[in-house]
Image (cartoon, grey):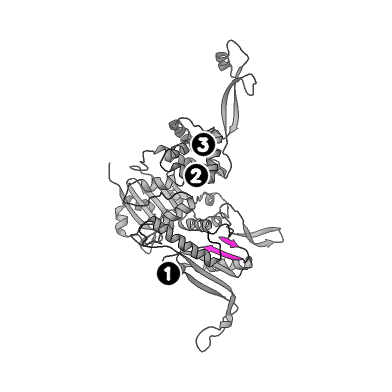
Amino acid sequence: MSSVARASIRDNNPVAPATLAQLPELAAVLTDRTLGQLKGDDLFVFPAFDAVDSGDPNAADQQDLTADQKVLFTKQRQVWAGNVMGFIGKGDEQLMITSRFVRPGRQDHFFQYLLAKVLGTPNVVDLSTTGSAQRPLVDLLRYSFPLYLRRALRKGLYKTYIRREENEAAVRGPIDVARHLRQNTPFLGNVAYSRRELTADNHVFQLVQATIDMLVGQAGGRKLLASVSDEVALVREAVGGRHGDVRQLINVNQQRPVMHAYYREYRDLQRLCLLLLQHRQIQLGLGTRQVYGILFDGAWLWEEYLNSLLAPAVMHPRNNSKKLKQFLFFDEETGRNKGSIFPDFIRDAPRVIVDAKYKPYGNIGGRDYQQMLAYLLRFESRHGYYLYPEQGTQLEHPLLVRQGLDAVPDESGRPDPSAIQHEWDLDRIGLHIPQDCADYPAFEAAMATSEAQLKRRLGLPID
């Protein structure tokens, strides 16, 4: 078996030519190709960007991650990493993309922490590139299963028509003459017939049940599924707690993928279950020509993490589900709302707008400011906050909103102070990301301190 070439880079950073030379085949297929071009049966992307290509003109404004984003792209004759984190490979080449908010060469506890908080799983994801070649991918796939299951079941139970063969007195379908003569001679009162039934006890849910049983049998599996115990119960109820032969289930689900656009979350869950069940020997992708892996949008992870931290004290309008959608205008002529908007977080009493930014404070500007001002005006708020990850020690960078025309500078060369509106302010507040922690438990403890400081600054209750 050939050796596996592995490397690690940080998101939103230039990639060293030596790293690209280590992974020539992977670099060739990733550079300047979009996620939409790369997505296949063995590549999972969060959040899903299918709606962008669905024909919905507003879809691009309702998603953090879009199909035209790139894992690697060329800028000024240099290759840069995009805004995704995770694990991706092709053949015997594998690349781990970690967070830019961790110093180079350090273990990325921050990415692990975000995954643990957002996926709601125990800390078991090993993002080290020095261990088993398959360990990071296997961990990320296994521990994203609860999130895929939860998303799918939000659409309700996936039902299909199946043909059942019955032999009873109460006939509820066309009689199967050949089978009837074979089974009911001499005649004792039963009739052999077949009927079609719309049911959740189908190939998809049986595949999910098989995956659940597999995970339960693995170390930490019961703890992993504890966060989706209600969803697991629904699956067990749908299939009666059983499933057929795993090999046959795999073949049936490969031949009959979920195709309906409304149930695309079930298609993603089906793909994940197939991958986990097919590769129980942990040979994911090795030796194949297809791109495989799992990628997370950094901005989406950061926003979902902040939601887990700030809820329920703040509302969190969700772009993808259109929950708590707000509008900028009302059109009197048509009687319809116009200009849908989704502020990241809104808090009442007092009204405060909070925007999540997965970028250094120095990169916050331009459209970020214009968007925040629109939110402040629309929601009649005078206080806005940008929350961003901070590696250093300076955690607050306040801004005061100007008003009116800028006056002629006085003798000091400074604009007239009366042109500054002191009642409106924006604050760029950093959540300190601990550096140089000895191990993950130490990082968790340091993050708890950072989170308490942030909540205290925002006036939120501290657990």
**Amino acid identity at mark 3:** Val
Q: Are marks 1 and 2 in contact (CB under 8 Å)?
A: no
Q: Residue furthest bottom?
A: 411
User: Relative to 370, does residue 210 appear above or below in the rendering?
Assistant: above
**Amino acid identity at mark 1:** Thr
Label 3, on which residue?
A: 204
Q: Residue furthest front?
A: 463
Does 168 appear in magenta?
A: no
On the image, which quarter does residue 444 sit in? bottom left
Q: Callout 3: helix, strand or loop?
A: helix
Dot 2 or dot 3: first in sequence order is 3
Q: CA distance from mark 2 to mark 3?
A: 22 Å
**Amino acid identity at mark 2:** Ala
On the image, which quarter does residue 344 sit in? bottom right
Dot 1 or dot 2: first in sequence order is 2
Q: Callout 1: helix, strand or loop?
A: loop
Q: Callout 2: helix, strand or loop?
A: helix
Q: Is residue 107 left or right of residue 256?
A: left
